[in-house]
Image (spheres, helix red, strand yellow):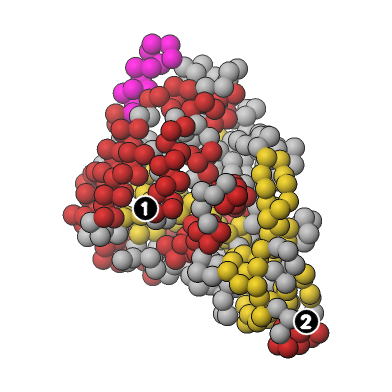
Amino acid sequence: MSRTVVRGGLVITAADEMHADVLVENGRIAALAAHGSPTAEEWRTSADRDIDATGKYVIPGGVDAHTHMELPFGGTFASDTFETGTRAAAWGGTTTIVDFAVQSRGQALRAGLDTWHAKSDAQCAIDYAFHMILSDVNQHTLKEMDLLVSEGVTSFKLFTAYPGVFYSDDGQILRAMQRAAGNGGLVMMHAENGIAIDVLVEQALAEGRTDPRYHGEVRRVLLEAEATHRTIQLARVAGAPLYVVHVSAEEAVAEITQARDKGLNVFGETCPQYLYLSTDNLAEPDFEGAKYVCSTPLRPREHQEALWRGLRTNDLQVVSTDHCPFCFRGQKELGRGDFSKIPNGMPGVENRMDLLHQGVVEGRITRRRWIEIACATPARMFGLYPKKGTIAPGSDADLVIYDPTAEQTISAETHHMNVDYSAYEGKQLTGQVETVLSRGELVIDRREFAGRAGHGQYIPRGTCQYLI
């Protein structure tokens, strides 16, 4: 039996803060005890590994429930592989990702899932699971949804955006929601009115408005709010829960808030880019704005306060990254002269925990809320709790020793994501990951990588544990 003791730190979960030592046995949390107590002292003398966390936080490993490693998009692929992306995640204190397997049009869900298993098998430095993107809703794929839920793929993403690629019409969305209502699955929705957006894209390009900033201008706030409202109503008709991904605008938050005030199982996720970046970045000169092209797009800065407020009031429950990196050179540049050809996506899997801790430093959220939106709630939302997302006896020993006073400057020069720029270049933060354990094994050891490809295990998930 291998025993590790993490001692002297402030243990923070979504529910508690306590000065306690943590005993890890065979990859799981065995017990917690008061620091300096006879029990804790006995652990220390008998442990195989003793980690001193004095003056640091001991927090659960982060759960990033929205990543896209190796995603094919616009004739290219996201630049992070499962190996590079999960290594970068670990550097940032994330120990579990939920990535998106993609069904190709005309193909079975199973074929898409098998493809993603092949990409990820024996590659990941941390644990991982999958959602399923539904590109083609029909009687066969509806039946496959039941089978996937029984096997632990319990969430399905649909799009009101990207006509001709991922888009589903209202009838298809309703059928998928009805199926989820019966099998316990959770429908995740990319909510933008893609049909209307395509009209505005066509008009903008015809008028010579081709720069990256027009990506944000054509993907109007009202078209996100409209699609959010519409899919909430479809979910009500189907009697199904709904999780709206990458919420970026105040008006969309208002639609989710209104639904939750009615007692509906409607949930919202936002991302660090919407909390810290804005249309000012999209408008950067010399095509630099292309670095910030993602969908939903960055919004004017005044929307940020509504998102932070939603996180405080629990009208938004989760912060994920939508990590989907494309290099500026050779990938983002595909859209020079036509913003609609810029691959949609930004890097961020390494920065999420630190950026949210900055929200703690600035008084926007509490420490426990930090852990709730980054660890506990995503684990509960996607059927991983309490294996993931907390520090409790029986939980996986996914632990982060976090230095709350360390100063760092985010830069592409020092990050570990496989992408040639940082969306937060030069941003100064207080707080930094020092050591990371995944199932009791060191992945980051005092700012040195100690992990390996293949340590990460695939996790079949339960159904949503967050329903009202």
Q: Residues within 10 Å of mark 2 (few under 14, many from 20)?
A: many
- Choose top left, top right, bottom left or bottom right for residue 3: bottom right
Locate residue 317, reporting x and y percent: 42, 55
In the rendered image, residue 344, in percent from the top left (x then y), is placed at 49, 34
The quarter of the picture where residue 241 lies is: bottom left
Q: Can residue 450 be spotted in the picture? A: no
Residue in the foreground of this view, choosing between 47 and 211: 47
| Image point (46%, 17%), residue name | 210
The quarter of the picture where the C terminus appears is: bottom left
Residue 124 is situated, as x and y percent measured from the top left of the image, at: 64, 58
- Furthest residue toward left: 237
Find numbered disc 1 in the image and state the secondary structure of the residue it sits on. Answer: loop
Question: Which residue corresponds to the image point at 71% horizontal and 57% vertical from the top-left?
Answer: 403
Q: Which amino acid is tagged 1?
A: Asp
Q: Which residues are magenta?
A: 197-209
Q: Evaluate whether residue 287 shows in this view.
A: yes
Q: Is residue 249 above or below residue 114?
A: above
**Magenta span includes 199:** yes
User: The residue under label 2 is which amino acid type?
Assistant: Arg
The residue at the point 70 percent across, 37 percent down is 412
Q: Residue at x 21, y 49 (%)?
A: 233
Quarter holding the N terminus is bottom right
Mark 2 and mark 1 residues within 8 Å of each other at the beta carbon: no
Which residue in the structure is indicated by mark 1?
Answer: 315
- Front in this rendered view, residue 380 or 182: 380
Mark sitting earlier along the chain (2/1): 2
Taking the magenta stretch, the answer to whether it contains residue 318 is: no
> Height in image: 109 above or below 223?
below
What residue is disc 2 on? 44
Main structural element of the magenta stretch: helix, strand or loop? helix
Residue at disc 2, secondary structure: helix
